[in-house]
């Protein structure tokens, strides 16, 4: 809901990070990410009246996201890794544009250049 609300993009990323960091440690652990994604996926499926994926599919998706974010292989995701992933993931940016009407300027430039090609 954070990303769908009005407000500045940077503020939304910071708020979202704090939500994911459920234990307040300042880092997102793998279980925190999996639990949060699971809740979000289940909620979206309910709202959209679509079938819920199997638990192992959700866990696999969460693991894939975690691997993409944890660029320093520390086993946790710090804020900079999280922010970089949100800003640089084409899939996330396309999702945000489709459902929130927002994207980063870098992604807008990239989309524009792709259109020119």
Image (cartoon, rainbow, N blue to C red):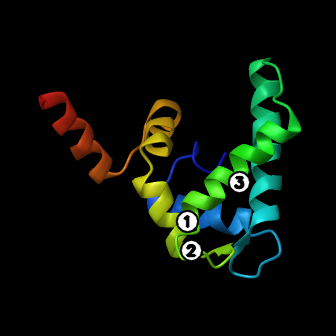
Horizontal arrangement in the rendering, residue 67 relative to residue 85 (left or right) = right
Percent x, y for residue 63?
A: 71, 54
Residue at image point 44% right, 44% down: 93
CA distance for labels 2 and 3:
18 Å
- Earlier in the chain: of badge 1 and badge 3, it is 3
Q: Residues within 10 Å of mark 1 (few under 14, many from 20)?
A: many
Q: Residues within 10 Å of mark 3 (few under 14, many from 20)?
A: some
Percent x, y for residue 14?
A: 57, 67
- For mark 3, give the secondary structure: helix
Residue 8 in view in this figure: no
| Residue beneath disc 2 | 79
Percent x, y for residue 11?
A: 51, 64
Residue at image point 44% right, 37% down: 94
- For mark 2, give the secondary structure: helix
Where 59 falls versus 24 (above or below)? above
CA distance for labels 1 and 2:
5 Å
Residues at discs 2 and 3 in contact (Cβ within 8 Å):
no
Residues at discs 1 and 2 in contact (Cβ within 8 Å):
yes
Of the 4 image quadrants, the one containing the N terminus is top right
Q: Residues within 10 Å of mark 2 (few under 14, many from 20)?
A: some
| Residue beneath disc 1 | 82
Horizontal arrangement in the rendering, residue 93 relative to residue 1 (left or right) = left
Where 26 falls versus 55 (above or below)? below
Q: Which label belongs to residue 63?
A: 3
């Amino acid at each position: 809901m954070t990303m769908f609300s009005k407000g500045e993009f940077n503020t939304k990323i910071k708020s979202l990070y704090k939500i994911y960091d459920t234990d307040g440690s300042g880092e997102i652990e793998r279980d925190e990410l999996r639990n949060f994604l699971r809740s979000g996926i289940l909620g979206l499926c309910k709202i959209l009246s679509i079938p819920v994926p199997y638990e192992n599919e959700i866990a696999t998706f969460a693991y894939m996201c975690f691997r993409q974010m944890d660029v320093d292989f520390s086993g946790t995701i710090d804020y900079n890794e999280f922010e970089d992933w949100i800003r640089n993931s084409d899939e996330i940016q396309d999702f945000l544009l489709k459902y929130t009407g927002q994207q980063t300027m870098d992604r807008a430039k990239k989309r524009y250049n792709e259109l020119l090609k």
